Amino acid sequence: MADLQRTVDQLAARLDRPLLLEDRVQRVVAYSEQSDAVDDVRRDSILRRRAAPEVRRWLRAAGIHEAAAPLRTPAAAHLGLLPRVCVPIRHAERLLGFLWFIDAAPPMTDAQVSEAADAAPGLALTLFHESLASGLAAHRELEAVTGLLLGERDTAAQAAERLIEAGAFPRAQPVSVQVARPRATPSDDALRPALEQGLLALRRRLSGHRPLHLVRYDHAVLLTAGPPVPADELHAALPVPVTVGIGRPRAGLARAAESYREARHAAEVLARVPGLGRTAEWARLGVYRMLTRLPDQELHPGLEELLADAQYLPLLETLETYLDLAGSAVATSRALRLHRTSLYYRLQRVEELAGTDLKDGGERLALHLSLKLARLSGRYSPRDSHSSS
């Protein structure tokens, strides 16, 4: 990056004109000292490190992404944008960035534009080397985070040490893991880049938490130092609706896989049981912490017929509410807005159809757990998700 800044400063001095260098997605890479005319767009780009979305759209429409030679772009008073000269930076026809000059007070001469264009190949080579170095660093991080979360214990310990030694994570801080699982399943080609971009943008905002991330085939993982970041920030950063599971913090990075397993478990439960909402901490999942480890075929045998026929759904909803409320007829009648006589009739029908006795504590427990397992497997989807624990 020092080479880029030096080249930018030297070119600005030769042309006696300030300039700004952006990468291909119009993030500011380097800029020279500003002494001449400056507009709102130049000022905001330097302060925010990137042009505003509406400015990027305007300049894209002016043809900067297709240009192979210097291009003059018009002013846009409604955006606070003065006319500009854009010099595209390309290496082997690959667009790597843009060199910008304000084309006013006074406009650039043809000779100045030509000299700026002559500097483009050198800038392109430096940008290309920077992108290779950045890509290599990103690849090493990806490899280390994958080993940390998915490797055996020794592999995870080695990966944690590599990340700490590289300065990517503090040695003496606990680690928290959150998993975001898309509610829908778009094509893999569309999903993964979208999740990557969202997480990278979030990491820039959360730099104080020393974040790391990993995108897998059906979910994204965010690791942070200290407590978890507010889940709303993760929801807002990602371009698709997700469920967010949160694992318990662990004492050191080497134990991140433990928090990851909990976070992934929580996100999967949310996906299977919509009534739980869009965010859940593993520690607050209640009975669902255990049930996902049980086979969903192991249900109370008397429920099979009721689960197989939609006409019995009101009976199952009544039974679940009754069991959630510890067998209290008063509380169940109030929750369902159901007359006590109607409640007793429904419960009696359940006993007859399921061949069970609701006065038997063991039967009540087996029925209750079976209904929760049926929720997880998708065999039972109550219309009113009043019960969620």
Image (cartoon, rainbow, N blue to C red):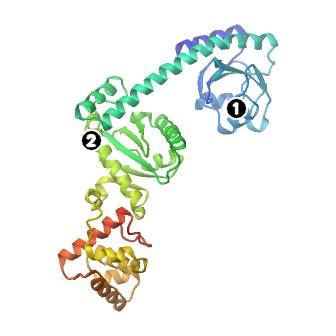
Q: Quadrant of residue 165?
A: top left
The structure residue drawn at horizontal position 37% and vertical position 29%, both measured from the top left corner, is: 143
Q: Amino acid at mark 1?
A: Asp
The amino acid type found where label 2 is placed reads Arg
**Residue 376 at x, y = what percent?**
35, 62
Instruction: Measure the C-alpha gap from mark 1 to mark 2.
Output: 46 Å
- Which of the 4 image quarters holds residue 86? top right
Label placed on residue 181: none
Image quadrant for the C terminus?
A: bottom left
Viewer-proximal residue among 13 and 218: 218
Query: Could you say which quadrant of the image residue 272 lies in?
Result: bottom left
* Number of the front mark, 1 or 2: 2
What residue would you read off at disc 2? 250
Which residue is located at x 80 percent, y 29 percent?
74
Residue positioned 23% across, 81% down in the render: 356
User: In the rendered view, does 313 fall on the left or right side of 131?
Assistant: left
Q: Position of residue 179 (x, y in %)?
A: 39, 46
* Residue to which mark 1 is pinned: 40
Asked if one can make out residue 379 in the rendered structure from this viewpoint, the answer is yes
Let me know if residue 389 appears in the view.
no
Q: Secondary structure at mark 1?
A: helix
- State how many labels appear: 2
Depth check, front residue: 303 or 110: 303
78 lies above or below 358? above
Badge 1: residue crowd in 10 Å (few <14, some 14–19, many ≥20): few
Q: Earlier in the sequence, mark 1 or mark 2?
A: 1
Q: Is residue 349 above or below residue 107?
A: below
Residue 202 position, x and y percent, is: 48, 39
Task: Please rate how many residues cluster around mark 2, counting C-alpha atoms within 10 Å: few if below 14, some from 14 to 19, many from 20.
Answer: many
